Image (tube, rainbow, N blue to C red):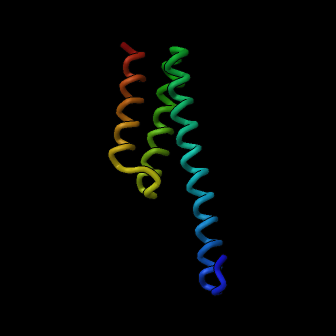
Amino acid sequence: MANIKSAIKRVDVNNKKRAQNQAAKSDMRSQIKQVEKLVEANDVENAKTALRKTTQTIDKAVQKGLIHKNNGNRQKARLTKKVNGLGA
């Protein structure tokens, strides 16, 4: 364990940030699963609304550095493809 005051503070700050990042990432994953569930149920309107919200969440995660830019783009592309497949 750290003995220096600044090191103790860094540990606390890092733990707090890690908890926030994990919560944001978990929320993003939950939203992705929600969209996939709506696609499975063939619920076009709700899937499109959920996709818009999920896209914003993914973009925010990329912006914060929680996931890589390419990972975010891949997730959005896959979800969009699934949702657009419903309308056809």
Residue at the extreme bottom: 4
Image point (62%, 73%), residue name: 11
- Counting from the top left corner in percent of width and height, residue 19 is at 62, 58
Image point (52%, 17%), residue name: 40
- Counting from the top left corner in percent of width and height, residue 74 is at 35, 37
- The answer to which quarter of the image holds residue 16 is bottom right
Image point (58%, 68%), residue name: 14
Image point (63%, 65%), residue name: 15
Lateral position of residue 62 relative to residue 6, left or right: left
Lateral position of residue 37 relative to residue 71, left or right: right
- The answer to which quarter of the image holds residue 26 is top right
Please state which of residues 12 and 47 is positioned toward the viewer in this rendering.
Answer: 12
Residue at the extreme front: 1
Lateral position of residue 23 relative to residue 87, left or right: right
Total numbered badges shown on the rendered structure: 0
Figure quadrant of the C terminus? top left
Above or below, 64 relative to 4: above
Please state which of residues 36 and 14 is positioned toward the viewer in this rendering.
Answer: 14
Figure quadrant of the N terminus? bottom right
Above or below, 77 relative to 13: above
- Counting from the top left corner in percent of width and height, residue 67 is at 43, 50
Above or below, 88 relative to 80: above
- Counting from the top left corner in percent of width and height, residue 58 is at 45, 44
